[in-house]
Amino acid sequence: MTPNEAIDLVRDAILMSLIVAAPLLLVGMVVGLGIGLIQALTQIQDQTVSTVPKLVAMTIAIIICLPWLTDRMLEYSRNLYREIPPHMSQR
C-alpha cells in the first residue's frame, strides 16, 4: 500500500464518519438551540430541561435515519472490501 492509498483510506473514513454523524448532530444542535432560546426567554436555567429533549430528539432521529445510515455504511464497507487487491487477501 502506498502512502497515497493510505491517505485516501483515512480521508474516506473521516468523510464517512462525518456523513453518518451529521443528521444526529444537526438534530441535537437545532433542538439545543431551540431549548436554549426558550430557557433564555423564560429564565429557567436547569440542565435537565435541555438534556432530556435533546436525547429524545436524537433517539427519534436515529430511528428515522437508521435505514439510510445502514445503507451508507454497507456501501462504504463493500467499496472498502472491493478495493483490497487479490494478492493481499491470500496472506
Image (cartoon, grey):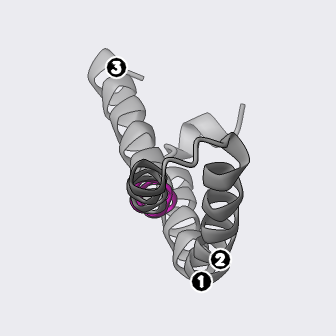
Residue at disc 3, secondary structure: loop
Q: Amino acid type of disc 3?
A: Thr
- Residue lying farthest left? 4
Q: Amino acid type of disc 2?
A: Ile
Q: Earlier in the sequence, mark 3 or mark 1?
A: 3
Q: Is residue 83 visible?
A: no
Dominant SS of magenta comes to helix
Q: Quadrant of residue 74?
A: bottom right
Instruction: Give the percent coordinates (x, y) of residue 61.
Output: 58, 73
Q: Nearer the viewer, mark 3 or mark 2?
A: 2
Q: Nearer the viewer, mark 3 or mark 1?
A: 1
Return the residue nearer the eye: 39 or 83.
39
| Residue occupying image coordinates x 46% and y 64% | 27
- The numbered mark at residue 64 is 1
Q: CB atoms at circles 2 and 1 under 8 Å apart?
A: yes
The residues colored magenta run 22-30
Residue at disc 1, secondary structure: helix
Q: Is residue 55 above or below residue 16?
A: below
Q: Dot 3 corresponds to which residue?
A: 2
- Residue lying farthest front? 43
Left or right position of 35 against 26: right
Instruction: Work out which quarter of the rendered image holds the N terminus and state it.
Output: top left
Return the residue nearer the eye: 36 or 24.
36
Return the residue nearer the eye: 66 or 79.
66
Instruction: Give the percent coordinates (x, y) of residue 49.
Output: 66, 54
Does the stretch in magenta take in 83? no
